Amino acid sequence: MVDNSTMENPQPKVVKYIAHLLSYVLHPLFIPTYFFLFLMQVLPFEFVGITEWQLKMRLFSVAWLTAFFPAFAVFLLWRLKLSDSIFLRTQKERIIPYVITMFFYWWMYYLSRNFTDQPIALKFFYLGIFVASAIGMTVNNFMKVSLHAMGIAGLTTSVILVSVFYPVNNAVWVLLAILLTALVISARLVVSDHTKKELIVGLLIGVVTQVAAYLWVV
């Protein structure tokens, strides 16, 4: 007799643990914060107009507005019984979180247009993730597109575009971003119920929206 549980989830426990860990650490909500940290390391000359304390406060603001508030909103939806899980496993459960993140992403883009002491890369990045969220919410009517794929693809594309726009040696960061993309997609195949099609569509949305935003802003 064949063990059905083994057939359904054949990966070793350590592989599933690592996949879960990667999914949490590289969650889409953390992507804007990671990108800001990346710019602080690669383009410090673009922040010369502000003090170190102000720069830290801006990093905190990015994390607060793009990670904490959307996550807290999802938590409230769960506690108010408007969703069955904080993991948003169904397409219906993802509609309100999409709207919430779209609001904060648009707000970050709006603010970035008025700052002259930060990289222009933030402008096209914020615009890109806002458009990606809008497209993701639309596609959500037809399939449960992978948010992880959208997020990591957007981050990787933005890292590549930074090396195109700025005269900096960005090869190591580009290779690291590509490696992380491969790891995240592999992790989602292991521990999520996403199909390959949903992952590929997520990757395409993340890439195309960042390129389009770059062309629009630059």
Image (cartoon, helix red, strand yellow):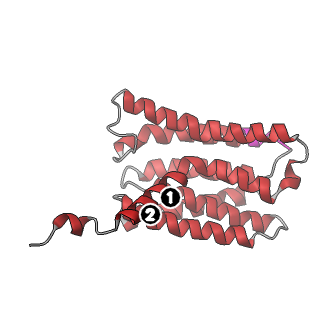
Residue 158 horizontal/vertical position (percent): 67, 61
Circle 2: residue type = Ala
The Cα atoms of the two marked residues, 2 and 1, are separated by 7 Å
Q: Which residue is mark 2?
A: 187
Q: Is residue 97 left or right of residue 212?
A: left
Q: Which residues are magenta?
A: 110-116
Residue contact between numbered discs 2 and 1, judged by CB atoms under 8 Å: yes
Query: In the rendered view, would you say 30 is above or below 161?
Result: above
Q: Which mark is residue 22?
A: 1
Circle 1: residue type = Leu
Q: What is the quadrant of residue 79 in the picture?
A: top left
Q: Is residue 166 left or right of residue 104?
A: right
Q: Earlier in the sequence, mark 2 or mark 1?
A: 1
Q: Nearer the viewer, residue 151 or 165?
A: 151
Q: Residue shown at 57%/36% (left/top)?
A: 68
Residue 195 horizontal/vertical position (percent): 35, 64
Q: Residue shown at 63%/36% (left/top)?
A: 64
Residue 127 shows in this picture = no
Quadrant, the N terminus: bottom left
Q: Residue shown at 86%/44% (left/top)?
A: 117
